[in-house]
Image: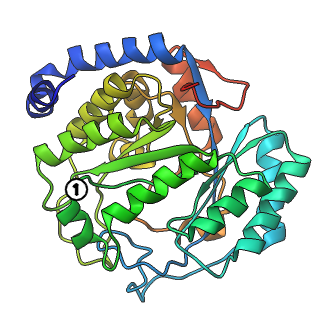
Amino acid sequence: MDRDEILYCLKTPGTDEELFRKADEARKKYCGDEAHIRGIIEFSSHCCRNCLYCGLRSGNKNLTRYRMEEEEIVSLALHIASLGVKTIVLQSGDDFHFTQSMLCRIIERVKKHADAAITLSVGERPLEDYRAFKLAGADRCLLKHETANEELYNKLHPNQSLKHRIRILEYLRETGYQTGAGNIVGLPGQSMEDICADILLLKELDTDMLSVGLFIPQHDTPLSQAPRGDLSLTLRTLALARIATRNSHMPVTTAIATAAPERGLFRGLKAGANVIMPDFTPDRHRKDYTIYDNKTHITLKKAIEAIKKSGRIISSGKGNSLKY
């Protein structure tokens, strides 16, 4: 698809049904009928960044912060693996309390006792940290680019830059990670041209995984009064990303499920997604991982139900990259 075709589909809601059908056909052709389940552990709500849209931002003084203990993280990861979930996602804010050696130790312990892939989603770290994590056994790393509009990115991420984030993504691939990027649809100040640029960037990066999120405001951020992103536009973006990238693994994001609690997971799967990521964070902590307001809780049961309802097969494997 070229730029004009992508823009036409983004701007024309009447094309949804046909677009989703084509995206689902592309998913079936390039990814098959297996849907993959990845279990998330949100192990720390501390973050040194101050991104304008995120409830974990360092400037949010109203948030109850937590850090899970190493033993609890490892124990929970092994429990997730015992349920047959073959990918563990370790996710946090940019929290340097968890040093390189601490995270390496956690990765090594999980890999020693569980036949599962480990995906890291820990924000921007020094490049040598990523190399150490890979040597410790990490398989994948998620680092969403958020928006391809450099000016908007820099505005939303004080003291950070889009160029640096892209460089990290390139380094992750060079280091041997299965990599993941992704965008947020509906960011204040974002245009249709920006979303088109996101899709074209994802096509260019050709990452093993990609994530299409939806902007939902958080009440303790500078963007608390901004309108929520449009669900239909987000699903169109997801479908276009599937067609453009063909065989990247693509989750139905929690934001999509939050915007449509009853049918969001199903609709995402029918628009080209092939991954669902249930959240195993302990109940006492989950309420404090408030990236945005009213975040829904995707359970393993909900994930299985949505996959079966969509007529798909639950994968029994680790869901490694389809790029090779």
Residue 139 occupies which quadrant of the picture?
top right
Residue drawn at point x = 53 percent, y = 82 percent: 64
Find the residue positioned furthest to the front: 174
Q: Badge 1 is on which residue?
A: 228
Residue drawn at point x = 43 percent, y = 58 percent: 167
Q: Is residue 4 above or below residue 222?
A: above
Of residue 43 and residue 296, the one placed in the foreground of this image is 43
Residue 155 occupies which quadrant of the picture?
bottom left
Q: Is residue 248 visible?
A: yes
Of residue 206 and residue 88, the one placed in the foreground of this image is 206
Q: Is residue 182 above or below residue 130?
A: above
Instruction: State the image coordinates of residue 179 (x, y, percent, origin top left).
Output: 53, 44
Q: Is residue 43 visible?
A: no
Q: Which of the image's four quarters has the N terminus?
A: top left
Instruction: Count neighbours of disc 1 (C-alpha within 10 A) and say few if under 14, some if 14 to 19, many if 20 or more.
Output: some
Q: How is the image coloured?
A: rainbow
Kind of residue at disc 1? Arg
Residue drawn at point x = 32 percent, y = 62 percent: 162
Q: Which of the image's four quarters has the C terminus?
A: top right
Instruction: State the image coordinates of residue 39 (x, y, percent, origin top left).
Output: 65, 46
Instruction: State the image coordinates of residue 8 (x, y, percent, origin top left).
Output: 9, 27
- The reply, left or right, for residue 161 in relation to residue 108 is left
- The reply, left or right, for residue 90 in relation to residue 255 is right
Q: Secondary structure at mark 1?
A: loop
Q: Is residue 178 above or below residue 126?
A: above
Residue drawn at point x = 33 percent, y = 19 percent: 23
- The reply, left or right, for residue 323 in relation to residue 113 is left
